Image (spheres, rainbow, N blue to C red):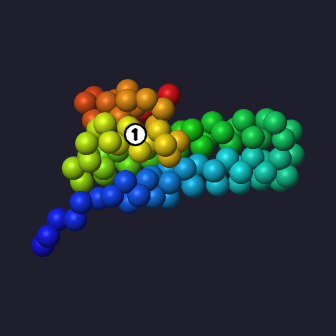
Amino acid sequence: MKYKKLSDYDIFLRGQLIVNLPVIFIILIIGFGLSMYVDLRFKTAMIIGVVLGWIYWSFSVKKWIQWAVANDVDEERLVRIGKRGLLVWSKSTVETVTKHNRTPFI
C-alpha cells in the first residue's frame, strides 16, 4: 500500500470537521436550548454553551493533533495550519499534546 502525503487542505478540513464545526453546534444548541426550554437568561445559557464547547474543544483538538502526528505531519506545519484554521493559538498547545501527552485546556 502506498503512503499518501496529506495536503494542508486535508489537515485543515479534518480539523474543521472534527473540532470547530461541533464546537459551534454545541454552543448554539446548548445556548438556545437552555434559554428556550429551561428558561435561563440568554447570556447565562450562552456562557454555559461556550464552557461546554471549550471542554469539547480541548478533547477534540487533542485527537486532531494526535491524528496529524500519526500521519507524519511536522509540528511547525501543524501549528501554522492550526492557527489559520482557528484550531490552536500557539505552539504550546501542540507541544502539550505531543511532548507531554496531556489535554490542552487554554
x 45%, y 47%: residue: 60
- Of residues 90 and 7, which is closer to you in this image? 7
In this image, 83 relative to 100: left or right? Answer: right
9 over 75 or under it: above or below? below
Q: Where does the image place residue 63, in percent across and percent down from the top left?
A: 37, 48
Q: How many marks?
A: 1
Q: Report x, y in % for residue 14.
A: 43, 57
Q: Can you see residue 57?
A: no
Identify the image quadrant of residue 43: top right
- Which of the 4 image quarters holds residue 47? top right
Is disc 1 placed on a helix, strand or loop? helix
For this orientation, the residue located farthest to the bottom is 1
For badge 1, the amino acid type reads: Arg
Classed neighbour count for the residue bearing mark 1: other residues with Cα under 10 Å, few (<14), some (14–19), many (≥20): some
Q: Which percent across, then down, holds residue 72?
A: 21, 50
Which residue is the site of mark 1? 80
Q: Image quarter for residue 29?
A: bottom right
Left or right: where does residue 70 sit relative to residue 17? Answer: left
Image coordinates of residue 16 in percent, x first then y, are: 50, 54
- The residue closer to the viewer here, 68 or 96, is 68
Is residue 100 visible in this depiction of the protein?
Answer: yes
Q: Quadrant of the N terminus?
A: bottom left
Q: Residue at x 37, y 29 (%)?
A: 91
